[in-house]
Image (cartoon, rainbow, N blue to C red):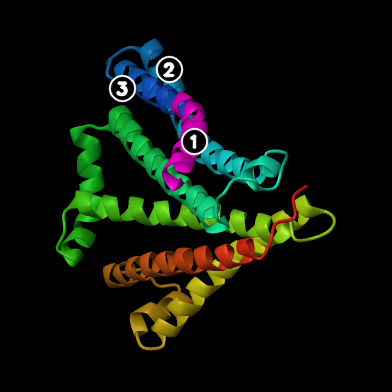
Amino acid sequence: MLKKLLKYDLKDRCKFLVIFYILSLFFALLTRLFLSIENSFIMNVIGQICSGVTISMIFNILINNLIRLWVRFKQNLYGDESYLTHTLPLEKKTLYLSKVLTSIITLFTSIVVIGLTLFVAYYSKENLEVVKNMLLPLADIYNSSVIGIILIFLFIFFLEFLNVLQSGYTGMILGHKMDNFKTGYSFLFGFLSYMAIQVFGLLVIFIMSLFNQDLMNLFITNEMINIEMIKIVIYSSTSIYLISFIVQYFVNLKLFEKGVNVD
């Protein structure tokens, strides 16, 4: 039953997101085409306009993905559709798991499309050299390639958005346990949930800094961040976001299983 529910949720999301995917790649191609034409002021201007639209499409993919997932979560579990949803012979953990898996899949797909869009629009040997010069010291520290470092950053970016998304789910679950002002409480609890994750992350890094002077410099000095500090922060951020996501998933599940007050 989870498979059918997941298929239904993904179909509902993808039919909307695919429009932004196509538009972002289309304008990325136009950006590359017009900016590749040298010694033409008009073509350069058109290329810059297309570049701006491409960046706009990237932000639209991320923002609309988040908002649509939140809206779908509310409508399906707390809105008019919820009366039908909660009559289905499904456990609440199955309903929530489907939403989370849909979130993971669509956000991952969006990050992949964004990466492909940036590659199509801006890849060149010169731009690649700039990126290599920026990331090569970090790649050497990790005994990795520049591509590997880029993938690590994209993974952290992905985890960050997953936590933002699930904080929104936390807000709605808690907000709809209130008798009045459910939407307002949902925003409040979602914001507090997200801030709690950030405070937890800073607290973990601060505790780690008590045993690492380089890391302590992040809190007590204005010195430039060195490669070793970046390495620690990357490891810490990845671990913190993963742990936060897992813990928040089970907390949300327990809260959701305690009962649902539909609008």
**Does residue 173 show up magenta in the picture?**
no
Q: Which residue is denoted by mark 2 in the rendering?
A: 45
Q: Which residue is mark 3?
A: 32
**Position in image of residue 40 (x %, y %):** 33, 12
Q: Where 8 falls versus 149 (above or below)?
A: above
Tell me: 138 left or right of 233.
left
105 vs 9, left or right, is: left
Q: Is residue 4 above or below residue 104?
A: above
From which residue to which does the magenta span run? 1-19
Q: Label 3: state its secondary structure.
A: helix
C-alpha span from label 3 to label 2: 13 Å
Q: Is residue 220 above or below residue 196?
A: below
Residue at (33, 20) in percent of width and height: 29
Q: Which is closer to the viewer, label 1 or label 3? A: 1
Residue found at the very far front of the displayed protein: 89
Q: Amino acid at mark 3?
A: Arg
Residue under pointer 1: 8
Q: Nearer the viewer's eye, disc 3 or disc 2?
A: 3
Tell me where residue 86 appears, x and y as whole percent.
65, 48
Q: Hey, which residue is sitting farthest bottom in the picture?
A: 211
| Numbered disc 2: secondary structure | helix
- Measured Cα–Cα span from mark 1 to mark 2: 43 Å
Point out which mark residue 17 bears. none
> Are discs 3 and 2 less than 8 Å apart at CB?
no
> In terms of sequence position, does the residue under pointer 1 or pointer 2 come before the other?
1
Q: Amino acid at mark 2?
A: Val
At a point 32% along the width and 69% down the height, the residue shown is 235
Q: Residues within 10 Å of mark 3 (few under 14, many from 20)?
A: many
Residue sitting at 50 percent across and 58 percent down?
Answer: 163
